Image (cartoon, grey):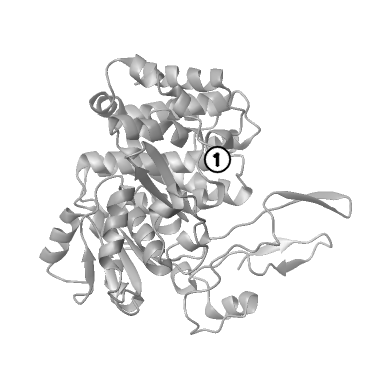
C-alpha cells in the first residue's frame, strides 16, 4: 500500500495514484479495497488515464516545508514468472487477433503445450521496425472480422504493431490519417491489448508508447497516451531462452539504456529513481550471464524483471538523448534499436556526470559502485564484455562522416530536450563524436 506523509505528519492512504494487480504484486485484496474501493473480484480494467488533477513535479508549500507532488500512472496488470504464459487464455475476452512475426507464429504452432487461442484471427507479418503503410493495409484487411481484443506476442516490434492495430480497429481510424493528414489520434476506443513479451528489452508491455516507422517519408512516428498501455502484460522467461545472442544483446542493452534514460530525464522522480536503480543493477548482472548461458532461466528472469522495471520508468519519464540519437541510426542504417541506443550511452553518462545534481551519485551507490566515476568505468567494462563495439561495427558505416551528417536529425522533441542538462548543437555533436570514438 502506498502512503504519503502529509504536512501534519500523519501517514494517510494516497488514493488513485498507482494501479496494480494485487495478486501479482503481493498486495492483499483487503488493502486494495481500503485505498481504491475496488472489490475483490472487480475486473482488471480500470481508468485508462492518469488523474488530470495531479500535475507532475508541482511544488507546493505547507507548514513552511517545500514539497514536490509527483504523478505515477501504470494501469497495466503484470504477470511475471516462469510459465506465466499459461495464464493467457484466462486474460482474453471475445474474438482475439494474434499479432506476431512469421518466426514467432511458426514457434507457436510447434509448441507442445499450446497456450494461445486456436480460434483467433492472425496477423503474422510483423517485421522489425513496423511500417506505417503496411500496418494500414493490415488494418483494412482485418476490419469487419468482429475482433474484440489483441494478443501481441514478441518483442517491441510485435507490441508496437499490436498497439497500432488495436487503435485502428477499435476507432476506425488509420495511421495515414493520423500522421500524414493531421487528424487527432483518438484518446479512447482502442481495443484492449494483452502483451506477451518474448524478449527482455523494450518494456513495451508496460508502456503507453508504440513506435511506427514511416519509411516512405523517412520519419519515425509515435503513438502514445494512456490508451496505449496494454491491459495485461505476460512476461515468461521460458519464452526468452531461445533468443539468439544478437537479439539478447540488443534487447538487453535497450533495457539498460531505458533505465538510465529515466534517471537522467528531466521528469525523473524519487519513485522512478528507485525502480531504475534496481533495473540497472539487475541488467548489469544478468546481461553478461544470459549471453554466456542462454538457457539459464534464473538469469533470464532477472533480465526480464530489469526490462519491465525500465519500461515502467520510461512510462513516467519518457526517454531522452540516447533515443533521440538512435532514431536516425535505425532509419538510415538499419541499426537494431538497442544497439542504436547503447551507441551514445557512455558519452551521455559523461555529459551528465559533470552536472550531477545527486541522482547519478545515488544510482552509483545503489548499484554498488560508490561513485559516478566508478559507475562510468563499470558501464564501459560491461559494454565491452557484451561486444557492443563489434556489433556496432557491423551495423554502422565505417565512414564516421555519414553518422555525423545525421546530427541535425537527432534533435527529437520530447527526447533530446528531456535530458537533465541542456542539449545544444555543440553538446549533441560532441556526444556523437565521443560515441564514434568509443565504438
Q: Position of residue 306 (x, y in %)?
A: 41, 49
User: Is 79 placed left or right of 104 in the picture?
Assistant: right
Specify whether 408 is left or right of 418: left
Q: Is residue 272 above or below residue 197?
A: above
Q: Is residue 122 left or right of residue 32?
A: left
* Location of residue 226 with respect to 371 vertically, above or below: below
Q: Is residue 335 visible?
A: yes
Q: Is residue 35 above or below residue 172?
A: below
Q: Position of residue 428 (x, y in %)?
A: 51, 23
Using the image as rendered, state which of residue 100 and residue 31 is in the foreground.
100
Frontmost residue, 19 versus 432: 432
Q: Position of residue 319 (x, y in %)?
A: 50, 42
Q: Quadrant of residue 233?
A: bottom left
Q: Which of 313/411 is in front?
A: 411
In the rendered image, is residue 378 in sight? no
For label 1, count other residues whose C-alpha is less than 10 Å away and answer few (under 14), some (14-19) or many (20+): few
Residue with the mark numbered 1: 414
Disc 1 on helix, strand or loop? loop
Q: Quadrant of residue 152?
A: bottom left
Quarter containing the N terminus: bottom right
Amino acid at each position: 500500500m502506498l502512503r504519503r506523509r502529509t504536512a501534519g505528519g500523519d501517514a494517510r492512504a494516497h488514493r488513485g495514484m498507482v494501479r496494480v494487480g494485487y495478486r501479482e504484486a503481493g498486495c492483499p485484496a483487503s488493502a486494495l479495497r481500503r485505498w481504491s474501493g475496488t472489490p475483490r473480484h472487480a475486473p482488471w480494467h480500470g481508468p485508462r488515464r492518469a488523474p488530470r488533477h495531479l500535475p507532475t513535479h508541482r511544488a507546493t508549500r505547507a507548514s513552511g516545508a517545500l514539497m514536490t507532488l509527483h504523478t505515477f500512472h501504470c494501469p497495466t496488470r503484470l504477470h511475471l514468472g516462469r510459465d506465466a504464459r499459461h495464464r493467457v487464455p484466462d486474460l482474453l475476452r471475445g474474438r482475439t487477433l494474434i499479432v506476431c512475426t512469421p518466426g514467432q507464429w511458426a514457434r507457436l504452432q510447434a509448441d507442445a503445450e499450446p497456450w494461445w487461442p486456436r480460434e483467433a484471427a492472425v496477423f503474422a507479418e510483423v517485421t522489425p521496425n513496423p511500417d506505417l503503410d503496411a500496418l494500414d493495409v493490415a488494418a483494412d484487411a482485418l476490419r469487419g472480422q468482429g475482433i474484440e481484443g489483441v494478443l501481441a506476442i514478441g518483442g517491441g516490434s510485435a507490441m508496437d504493431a499490436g498497439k497500432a492495430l488495436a487503435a485502428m480497429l477499435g476507432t476506425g481510424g488509420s495511421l495515414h490519417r493520423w500522421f500524414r493528414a493531421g487528424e487527432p489520434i483518438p484518446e479512447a476506443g482502442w481495443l484492449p491489448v494483452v502483451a506477451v513479451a518474448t524478449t527482455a528489452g523494450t518494456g513495451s508491455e508496460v508502456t503507453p508508447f508504440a513506435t511506427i516507422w514511416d519509411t516512405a517519408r523517412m520519419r519515425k512516428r509515435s503513438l502514445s497516451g494512456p490508451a496505449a498501455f496494454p491491459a495485461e502484460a505476460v512476461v515468461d522467461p521460458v519464452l526468452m531462452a531461445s533468443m539468439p545472442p544478437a537479439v539478447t544483446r540488443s534487447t538487453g542493452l535497450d533495457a539498460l539504456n531505458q533505465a538510465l534514460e529515466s534517471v537522467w530525464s528531466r521528469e525523473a522522480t524519487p519513485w522512478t529513481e528507485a525502480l531504475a536503480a534496481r533495473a540497472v543493477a539487475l541488467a548489469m548482472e544478468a546481461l553478461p550471464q544470459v549471453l554466456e548461458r542462454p538457457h539459464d532461466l534464473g538469469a533470464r528472469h532477472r533480465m526480464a524483471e530489469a526490462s519491465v522495471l525500465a519500461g515502467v520508468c520510461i512510462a513516467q519519464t519518457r526517454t531522452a538523448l540516447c533515443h533521440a540519437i538512435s532514431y536516425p541510426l535505425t532509419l538510415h542504417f538499419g541499426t537494431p534499436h538497442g544497439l542504436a541506443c547503447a551507441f551514445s550511452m557512455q558519452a551521455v553518462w559523461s555529459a551528465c556526470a559533470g552536472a550531477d545534481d545527486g541522482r547519478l551519485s545515488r544510482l552509483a551507490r545503489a548499484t554498488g559502485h560508490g561513485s559516478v566515476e566508478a559507475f562510468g568505468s563499470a558501464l564501459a567494462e560491461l559494454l565491452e564484455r557484451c561486444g557492443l563495439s563489434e556489433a556496432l561495427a557491423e551495423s554502422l558505416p565505417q565512414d564516421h562522416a555519414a553518422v555525423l551528417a545525421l546530427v541535425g536529425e537527432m534533435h527529437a522533441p520530447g527526447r533530446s530536450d528531456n535530458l537533465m542538462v541542456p542539449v545544444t548543437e555543440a553538446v549533441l555533436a560532441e556526444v556523437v563524436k565521443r560515441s564514434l570514438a568509443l565504438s
